[in-house]
Image (tube, rainbow, N blue to C red):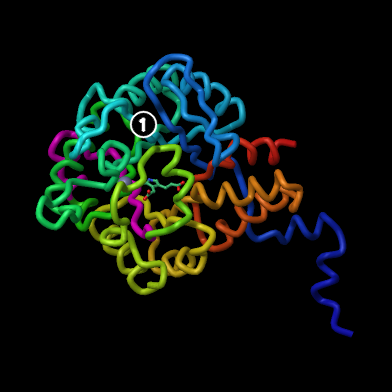
Amino acid sequence: MFKRYRRTRSNTLFRDLLQESRLVIDDFIYPLFIKEGRGVKIEVSSMPGVFQMSIDEAIKECDELKRLGIRSIILFGIPTIKDSVGSEAMDEDGIIAKATREIKRSHEDMLVVVDVCFCEYTDHGHCGVLDPKTKNVHNDATLLNLKKQSLILAQAGADMLAPSGMMDGMVKSIRDELDKNGFENLPIMSYSTKFASAYYGPFRDVAQSSPSFGDRKTYQENPANRREAILESLEDEAQGADILMVKPALAYLDIVRDIRERTLLPLAVYNVSGEYAMLKMAGKAGLIDYEKCVLETMLSFKRAGADIIISYHAKEIANFLNS
Ligand code: PBG
Ligand code: ZN
């Protein structure tokens, strides 16, 4: 009788020895949503366990993250004032510029990544400047603003920029601007393959960034397109991205694998808000073993070829891995 597979599954020593992918907490980046004020910490109803917080609370949160072994965060801003171009994103006293400076001052040893986009800062909720005639996001006008936003965040002390707006040419524009201003050592992690996904729903509640009209299909990718998804990540590599990304993660594992096989760059996945909410709610309803399902999902990202996982589950995972 054929027994090869059963033979090497017979005990944990064999199973651990033969395990092909593994989760380590160093692979994770934890997202933080920053708001004005002091002592503010508001739980998001669609994402239990995720909070909007003021800078002082974020600084306390970093103590907790380091205690858990998490040393990388990505910042999203919730400005007090929104306008048609998202001015606050280009202001050195804007919420994320301030948060970056203050977090780096208290936590020099934390890797602070910043999301570079305008949807949280515009009153219409789109990821850039609108063309007055078509009401479509104007690509090249947005590139000019992305340069300004990037420079402000670089000067504030960000360790890495993560442009997420899906404008054509965004990586090259930002790279040129950084290089011209003495930031040639600052890496760019591009949201290189980002789909127009319904899984961003809860994030848009937290970040208050839902488009007030239309959708993001004129700049984010069609979920049906595989070749285009590969092309666009390779394009960002050619433009000088240091790290590529696929977003969302779970419904796009095939794309993660496709890109993994075509680039030698590090590859991140963004395990998005809707993915988090689904597991969370199923866990709360007692329908699944939450811990096991979270770990199995994370392992699927590693198996598909991801090096880095951006996830709202990072703190829970740290606890699971430590116990
Ligand atoms: C916006 C942005 C989005 C996310 C991160 N940056 C989504 C969007 O297009 O509205 C989604 C993150 C998540 O759902 O967790 N540039
Ligand atoms: Zn955006």
Q: Which of 81 and 240 is in front in this view?
A: 81
Could you tell me residue 155's position as x and y percent? 23, 27
**Quadrant in the rendering for residue 63:** top right
Q: Kindly give the residue lying farthest to the front in the view shown.
A: 213
Q: Which of 127 and 70 is in front in this view?
A: 127
> In the image, 305: left or right of 189?
right
Rendered view: 109 above or below 288: above
Point out the stretch of residues depicted in magenta.
173-195
Q: Which residue is drawn at 38% across and 57% down?
A: 265
Could you tell me residue 300's position as x and y percent? 60, 59
**Quadrant in the rendering for residue 194:** bottom left
Q: Which of 96 and 51 is in front in this view?
A: 51
Q: Kindly give the residue lying farthest to the left in the view shown.
A: 133
Residue that badge 1 annotates: 78
In the rendered structure, does residue 313 fall within the stretch colored magenta?
Answer: no
Q: Which of 177 and 140 is in front in this view?
A: 140
Rendered view: 313 above or below 230: above
Crowd rating for badge 1 (residues with CA inside 10 Å; few <14, some 14–19, many 20+): many
> In the image, 143: left or right of 196?
left
Dot 1: element: strand
Could you tell me residue 170's position as x and y percent? 22, 51
> In the image, 136: left or right of 37?
left
Q: Residue at x 65, y 47 (%)?
A: 281
Question: Disc 1 residue type?
Answer: Ile
In the rendered structure, does residue 178 fall within the stretch colored magenta?
Answer: yes
Q: Kindly give the residue lying farthest to the bottom in the view shown.
A: 1
Rendered view: 313 above or below 132: above
